[in-house]
Image (spheres, rainbow, N blue to C red):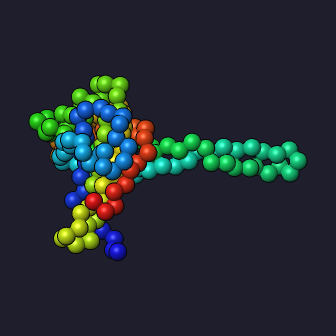
Amino acid sequence: MTINATGGSRLFICTTPTTSADDVSAYAALTWVEVNEIESIAAFGDKASSITFTSLKDSRVRKLKGPRDAGDVDVVYGHDPVDAGQIALSAAQRTKFSYPIKVTISDAQDESAADSAFYFQAKISGVPINPGSATDVTKRTVTLGIDTEIVEDLTS
């Protein structure tokens, strides 16, 4: 196994909110729309919160693992007002529902293999526009509030 550059990674949204997808085959059966002109995808994945208790007897803090949170993911992309994926993200942020998301990481080991895929559902909580300065590309940053387990398909 080798390491890989991130170039070639992709992001997709299912335009129909659903809560029934919870494994690789259910996610793979959905219809996906690609979001084009992605510049970056922030880190995502489960992290357990910390629950603490301090004993008076020995003044020692005890730590327990609490609920897991897969995080809020900021995705930066070049604004394209006619891109179907970007339009779908904007429409999704106007609802209260979670939408299936697929991220593929460009890590295929050879031409016969496929890239790894990560599936989850998220609430799209904003798509603010960043016009920048005269020499900048107009960008948007969408926030994906992950509210399910992340399903990994490392053999897709």
Residue 6 seen from this side: no
How far across and down, in percent of the image, does residue 84 sit?
14, 37
When asked about the image quadrant of residue 19, the answer is: top left
Q: Residue at x 67, y 48 (%)?
A: 64
How far across and down, in percent of the image, does residue 77 sit?
23, 45
Q: In this view, does 57 lie to the left or right of 110?
A: right
When asked about the image quadrant of residue 26, the answer is: top left
How far across and down, in percent of the image, does residue 33 sit?
19, 42
Q: As displayed, is residue 129 above or below residue 44? A: above
Q: Residue at x 57, y 42 (%)?
A: 67
Q: Residue at x 26, y 71 (%)?
A: 109
- Quarter containing the N terminus: bottom left
- Say which of 11 and 116 sits in front: 116
Residue that extends furthest to the top in the rendered view of this protein = 95
Residue that extends furthest to the right in the rendered view of this protein = 57
Q: Is residue 38 left or right of residue 45?
A: left
